Image (tube, rainbow, N blue to C red):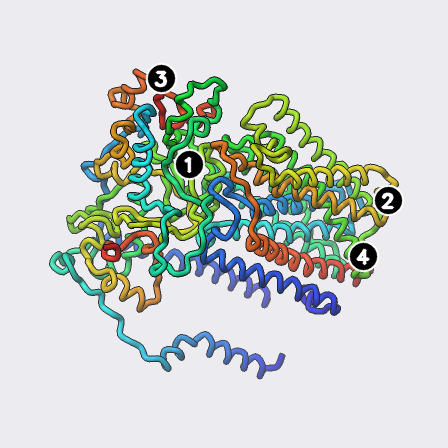
C-alpha cells in the first residue's frame, strides 16, 4: 500500500520537500543541543520543563481526540463517520510520533532512554505513560492499516481487529489520563494538584483533536477528490462545541476553588497566569488570548447558523485549536513552575533554537500525517467511497 | 527482476558487508598494544581477578562495582585471592588508578586501539590530570 | 508454504538474537562462579551507620559568613560548578555564555519566607527576616522524587539517604517537578569549565543529568562527618533520627523545631531549630 505515497502531484512533492527542509533545520538545531546540552533552551533550574513538554502534553490530547470518531462509529454504528474514522486514527498515529519525539528531544541523556525499560519503576507515572503511549500508537497503526487495506481489497477487515478497536478506546482515554497524572500527583505544585486536571485534559483534547480533524477535512476536500462528508464534519463540530464548553467550565471550577478558598500555594500560579505576580506577567496576554479564542470559538459553534456556515466553521475550529494549545501547552507547564516551590519567580520563554527544534518535530509529524492521509484518501478514491 | 540483477545485488551486498576486511587490507594494521603495568601494580602482580578474566570482563566487574558503591553503599571488595580493594576508579591508593599509576598506558592504549570510548572519564578524574 | 517457512525462520532468528544479547552476561556469570566464588563486597569498617540519617540546623548559630563557608565547603568538594567562575579559555576555548538561571546548587542560604513560604506570618519577629536559612535536599522519608523517577536513578537508601545514581539518570527532570523544595539542579551544560579546581575525591557530573545533595554519603562511608557539618562551626548536626540516644534526638527533645512544608506529608529529615 505504501507505494501510493511515491506517486503524487507537483504540489504534493513541494509540500514533502518543504517538510523535509524544516525537519533538516530541526535536526541541525537538535544536534547542537545533543552535543552542548539543554543549555540552548530557555529552561532553568526553576522552570525545568518547557516548550517540548508543553507541546508533548498538547499533542497527547490531539492523539486522544481521535477516539471521538472511533466511539460513534464503532460503538454506536454512526455510519456518517465511516469515511473519517481512518482519518482520526491516522491523526492519532502522527500525533503520537510527535509526542515520542518531543520526549526524546527533552531528555538530557537521550542515549540512556532505554533505562526506562531496563529498570522499570512501577511507582513512576512516566513508566505508565510510556506503556499507554506506545500501546496506543501500536493499536492505531495496526487498526488503521488493516482496515484500510481491507477497504482497498474490498473485503471485510479481519475479525481480530475488532477487539483491538474496542481496546483502543480505553487506551485513548488512558493516554491523556496518565499524562494528567504525571502532573496532578506531585505534592508541591499547587497549579497541577487538582483532581479536575485529567477531566480538563480530556475535555480540551476532545475539543482540539476533532477541531483539527475538521480543518484537515477542509484540506482534503481542496486537494483530493475524496469527500469526507459535510454531515460528518457537522457532527464533529458539535463534539468540538460541547468539549470546549466542558473545558472552559472545568477551568472556571478551578478558578472558583482557587480564588474562593484563597490558599496561596494554589492561587499564586493562576494569579501569575491571569494577572501577573509581583510584576512578572509574560504569560498574561497569552492566557487571555487563549481563553478568548476558546470562548469565542465556542459561541460560534453553539449557534447553529454560524456552525453551518462553510466559511466560518474552519475559523472557529482554528480558534479553539490554538486556544487549547496556549491553555494546555505554555500555560499548563510554565504556570505550574512559576512561582517556584520557594516562591521565587523565574519566567520562561523558549529560545529560537528551541522553537526550531519544535518545528522540526512538528514537520516530522506532518510528514507522517501527509503520507498516511495520502494513502487513506487515495484508497478511498479508488474504491469510489 | 532478472536473475542478473539479483546476483549483482548480492555481490554488492557481500562486498559491502566485508568492507572492514577490505579496509584493513589497504591500511596498515598494528599489533594490539599490551597494557603496561606501572607504579605499585608492577610489584603487586595480583589484581582483582586473574589476568585473562580481567581482560575479558573488567567492564562487567566495574559495572557491578558501581552498583555496589552507589546503590548498596558497599565500598570494599575482597577478591577471591584474598586481597581487598577499594571499589573506586580513582580515589585513594587502593583504587584502580591508585595502583595502575598511568591511565594513558593502562586504560587508554587498549581502548584507543579497539575504538572504545568509555564515558567513565567524563566525570571520574584521573588524579594525574589535575595537579 | 513459502510464507510459513519465512515466518518460522524469523522466529528462530529472533530467539537467536536474544541469545546473542544475553551471552556476554551469562559468560560473565559463569566465570564469576568459578574464578571468584569467594569474592565479597563489604562496607568499610570505619563507616558511620544510622537507621535513618537526619540533620538539625541551629539557625541562630549561622551568620552570613558561616553560611558562605558551608556552601563553599560543600560545593568545592563535590565539584559543583560555579557559573560566576571565569572560564580558562585556553583549556575550554568554545565555552558559550552562561544563563545564570541554569545554576547548580546543593546547599545555599535563603530568607525565611522563601525557605518556609507557608509560614510567612504578617507580624513575624523582625530578626527572622535577616537570618540565613540553609536549604538543601530534605532526604524525605516519603520522597516524591523517588516515586517520580522512571529509572530508579533516584532512590532511598536503607539508611534514609535519598541519593542519585548519575550513571543511570536519563535527564527527564520529572524529579525536579516532583520536589516540593526546589532542591534539585539539572546539568544544562558540561560543568567542567566552571569548576575552579576539581576535587579528585569526588566525581564531577556530565551534562544532562540531575544532581543534588547526597548527605556526603562518600564521607559517612569513611567514618567522617559531612562537609557542611565541619564547616558550620557547630550549627549543623547530623545523626541517627531513629536512635533516641543520638545527639540530634537530644536537640529535638529539648528545642522546638520546624520542617519545610511538613503539611505535604513528605516527612523531611532536616529539622530547623530557630
Please give the chain letter of the residue carrying mark 4.
A
Q: Which callout, 3 or 1, points at the residue further toward the start of the chain?
A: 1
Quadrant assignment, res A60: top right
B55 or B103: nearer the viewer: B103
Residue A338 appears in which quarter of the rendering?
Answer: top right
Q: Which residue was labeled with disc 2?
A: A308
* Disc nearer the start of the sequence (2/4): 4
Q: Are marks 3 and 1 on the same chain?
A: yes
> At which x and y percent is residue B116?
34, 63
Residue occupying the far right of the picture: A305
Whether pointer 4 and pointer 3 mark residues with C-beta atoms closer than 8 Å, the reply is no
The answer to whether residue B79 is seen in the rendering is: no
What residue is disc 1 on? C183
Q: Is residue A241 above or below residue A51?
A: above
Residue at horizontal 60%, vertical 29%? A195
Between residue C83 and residue B28, name the one nearer to us.
C83
Nearer the camera: disc 3 or disc 2: 3
Q: Which mark is residue A221?
A: 4
Q: Which element carries disc 1, helix, strand or loop?
A: loop
Real-space CA distance between mark 4 and mark 3, rounded to the nearest whole angstrom:
73 Å
Give the CA separation, mark 2 to mark 1. 54 Å
**Vertical relation: A238 (above or below) B116:** above
Other residues around mark 1 within 10 Å, as few (<14) / some (14–19) / many (≥20): many
Say left or right for C184 vs A282.
Answer: left
Residue under label 3: C256
Residue furthest to the left in view is B43
Q: Where C24 sits versus B115, above or below?
A: above
Amino acid at each position: 500500500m505504501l507505494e501510493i505515497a511515491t506517486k503524487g502531484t507537483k504540489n504534493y512533492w513541494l509540500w514533502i520537500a518543504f517538510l523535509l527542509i524544516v525537519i533538516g533545520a530541526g535536526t541541525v538545531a537538535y544536534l547542537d543541543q545533543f552535543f552542548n546540552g539543554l543549555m540552548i533552551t530557555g529552561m532553568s533550574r526553576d522552570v525545568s520543563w518547557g516548550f517540548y513538554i508543553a507541546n508533548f502534553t498538547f499533542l497527547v490530547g490531539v492523539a486522544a481526540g481521535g477516539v471521538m470518531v472511533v466511539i460513534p462509529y464503532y460503538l454506536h454504528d454512526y455510519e456518517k463517520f465511516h469515511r473519517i474514522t481512518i482519518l482520526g486514527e491516522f491523526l492519532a498515529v502522527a500525533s503520537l510520533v510527535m509526542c515520542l519525539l518531543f520526549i526524546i528531544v527533552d531528555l538530557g541523556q537521550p542515549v540512556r532512554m532505554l533505562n526506562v525499560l531496563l529498570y522499570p519503576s512501577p511507582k513512576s507515572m512516566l513508566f505508565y505513560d510510556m506503556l499507554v503511549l506506545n500501546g496506543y500508537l501500536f493499536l492505531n497503526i495496526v487498526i488503521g492499516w488493516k482496515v484500510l487495506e481491507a477497504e482497498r481489497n474490498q473485503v471485510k477487515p479481519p475479525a481480530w481487529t475488532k477487539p483491538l478497536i474496542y481496546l483502543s478506546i480505553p487506551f485513548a482515554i488512558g493516554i491523556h489520563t496518565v499524562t494528567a497524572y504525571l502532573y496532578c500527583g506531585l505534592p508541591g505544585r499547587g497549579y497541577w494538584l487538582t483532581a479536575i486536571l485529567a477531566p480538563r485534559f480530556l475535555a480540551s483534547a476532545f475539543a482540539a483533536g476533532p477541531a483539527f480533524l475538521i480543518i484537515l477535512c477542509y484540506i482534503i476536500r481542496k486537494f483530493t477528490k475524496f469527500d469526507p462528508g459535510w454531515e460528518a464534519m457537522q457532527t464533529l463540530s458539535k463534539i468540538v462545541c460541547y468539549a470546549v464548553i466542558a473545558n472552559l467550565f472545568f477551568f472556571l471550577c478551578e478558578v472558583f476553588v482557587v480564588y474562593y478558598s484563597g490558599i496561596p500555594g494554589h492561587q499564586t500560579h493562576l494569579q501569575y497566569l491571569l494577572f501577573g505576580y509581583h510584576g512578572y506577567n509574560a504569560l498574561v496576554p497569552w492566557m487571555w488570548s487563549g481563553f478568548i479564542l476558546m470562548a469565542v470559538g465556542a459561541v460560534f459553534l453553539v449557534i447553529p447558523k454560524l456552525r453551518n456556515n462553510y466559511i466560518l466553521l474552519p475559523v472557529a475550529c482554528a480558534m479553539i485549536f490554538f486556544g487549547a494549545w496556549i491553555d494546555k501547552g505554555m500555560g499548563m507547564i510554565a504556570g505550574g513552575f512559576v512561582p517556584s516551590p520557594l516562591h521565587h519567580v523565574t519566567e520562561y520563554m523558549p529560545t529560537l533554537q528551541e522553537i526550531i527544534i519544535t518545528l522540526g518535530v512538528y514537520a516530522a509529524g506532518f510528514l507522517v500525517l501527509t503520507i498516511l492521509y495520502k494513502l487513506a484518501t487515495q484508497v478511498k478514491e479508488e474504491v469510489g467511497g | 527482476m532478472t536473475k542478473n540483477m539479483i546476483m549483482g545485488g548480492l555481490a554488492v551486498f557481500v562486498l559491502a558487508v566485508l568492507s572492514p576486511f577490505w579496509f584493513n587490507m589497504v591500511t596498515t594494521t598494528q599489533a594490539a598494544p599490551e597494557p603496561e603495568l606501572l607504579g605499585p601494580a608492577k610489584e603487586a602482580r595480583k589484581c582483582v581477578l586473574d589476568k585473562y578474566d580481567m581482560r575479558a570482563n573488567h567492564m562487567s566487574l566495574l559495572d557491578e562495582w558501581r552498583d555496589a558503591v552507589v546503590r548498596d553503599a558497599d565500598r570494599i571488595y575482597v577478591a577471591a585471592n584474598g586481597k581487598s580493594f577499594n571499589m573506586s576508579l580513582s580515589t585513594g591508593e587502593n583504587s584502580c588508578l591508585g595502583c595502575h599509576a598511568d591511565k594513558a598506558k593502562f586504560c587508554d592504549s587498549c581502548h584507543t586501539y579497539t575504538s572504545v570510548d568509555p564515558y567513565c572519564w567524563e566525570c571520574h578524574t584521573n588524579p594525574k590530570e589535575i595537579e | 508454504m513459502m510464507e510459513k517457512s519465512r515466518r518460522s525462520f524469523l522466529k528462530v532468528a529472533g530467539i537467536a538474537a536474544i541469545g546473542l544479547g544475553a551471552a556476554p552476561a551469562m559468560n560473565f556469570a559463569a566465570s564469576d562462579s568459578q574464578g571468584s566464588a569467594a569474592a565479597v563486597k563489604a562496607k568499610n569498617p570505619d563507616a558511620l551507620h544510622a537507621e535513618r540519617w537526619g540533620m538539625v540546623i541551629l539557625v541562630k548559630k549561622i551568620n552570613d559568613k558561616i553560611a558562605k563557608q558551608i556552601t563553599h565547603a560543600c560545593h568545592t568538594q563535590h565539584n559543583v560548578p560555579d557559573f560566576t567562575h571565569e572560564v580558562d579559555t585556553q583549556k575550554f576555548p568554545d565555552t558559550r555564555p552562561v544563563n545564570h538561571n541554569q545554576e547548580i546548587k546543593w546547599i545555599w542560604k535563603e530568607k525565611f519566607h522563601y525557605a518556609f513560604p507557608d509560614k510567612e506570618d504578617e507580624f513575624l519577629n523582625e530578626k527572622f527576616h535577616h537570618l540565613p536559612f540553609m536549604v538543601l535536599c530534605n532526604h524525605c522519608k516519603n520522597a516524591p522524587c523517588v516515586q517520580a523517577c522512571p529509572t530508579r536513578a533516584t532512590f532511598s537508601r536503607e539508611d534514609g539517604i535519598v541519593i542519585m545514581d548519575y550513571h543511570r539518570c536519563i535527564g527527564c527532570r520529572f524529579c525536579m517537578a516532583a520536589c516540593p523544595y526546589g532542591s534539585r539542579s539539572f546539568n544544562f551544560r558540561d560543568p567542567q569549565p566552571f569548576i575552579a579546581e576539581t576535587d579528585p575525591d569526588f566525581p564531577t557530573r556530565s551534562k544532562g543529568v540531575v544532581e543534588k545533595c547526597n548527605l556526603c554519603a562518600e564521607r559517612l562511608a569513611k567514618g567522617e562527618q559531612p562537609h557542611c557539618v565541619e564547616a558550620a562551626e557547630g550549627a549543623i548536626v547530623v545523626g541517627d533520627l531513629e536512635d533516641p540516644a543520638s545527639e540530634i534526638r537530644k536537640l529535638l527533645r529539648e528545642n522546638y523545631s520546624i520542617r519545610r512544608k511538613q503539611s505535604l506529608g513528605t516527612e523531611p529529615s532536616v529539622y530547623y531549630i530557630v
